[in-house]
Amino acid sequence: MLEYLLRLLILLPLVGGMAWGSLWLWKRVQMGGPLAGAKQERPIEMVGVLPLGPGTKLAVVEFAGQRILLSVSRGQVTRLADNSQGDFHVG
């Protein structure tokens, strides 16, 4: 019985730490972030995301000095507006 409790006390935190580490790594890989911690310079940056419902989001991305409002669904990305003149224009 004592051997069982000792194994439980050792293996339970180990398994929990491995689960947490794998979720952290999966999140980093899904977001396309650098694994080493160095900040990469990208031509496009995600400014913000607003979930609207299951599988649908509004996203603002910055590209070439412009901010672009996108509608993102499971099978489609649609440009809704951009700020080419300083404020958002529907297009």
Image: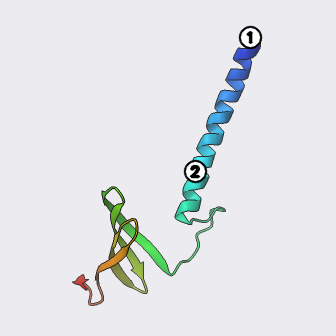
Q: Describe residue 64's horizontal placement relative to residue 82 as left or right.
A: right
Would you say the residues marked 2 and 1 are in contact, meaning their CB atoms lie under 8 Å apart?
Answer: no
Residue 40 placement (x, y as % from top left): 59, 73
Residue 24's tag is: 2
Residue 57's tag is: none
**Badge 2 element:** helix
Q: Residue furthest right?
A: 3
Residue 1 placement (x, y as % from top left): 73, 9
Q: Amino acid at mark 2?
A: Trp
Q: Earlier in the sequence, mark 2 or mark 1?
A: 1
Q: Residues within 10 Å of mark 2 (few under 14, many from 20)?
A: few
Q: Amino acid at mark 1?
A: Leu
Residue 51 placement (x, y as % from top left): 32, 59
Considering depth in this image, is 35 or 58 the residue closer to the camera?
A: 58
> Residue drawn at (65%, 28%), measured in percent from left and top?
12
Considering depth in this image, is 80 or 10 the residue closer to the camera?
A: 80
Q: Is residue 82 above or below residue 58?
A: below
Considering depth in this image, is 74 or 23 the residue closer to the camera?
A: 74
Q: Where is residue 64, by image quadrant?
A: bottom left
In the rendered image, which residue does mark 1 sit on?
2
Q: Where is residue 59, by image quadrant?
A: bottom left
Q: Where is residue 74, by image quadrant?
A: bottom left
**Badge 1 element:** helix
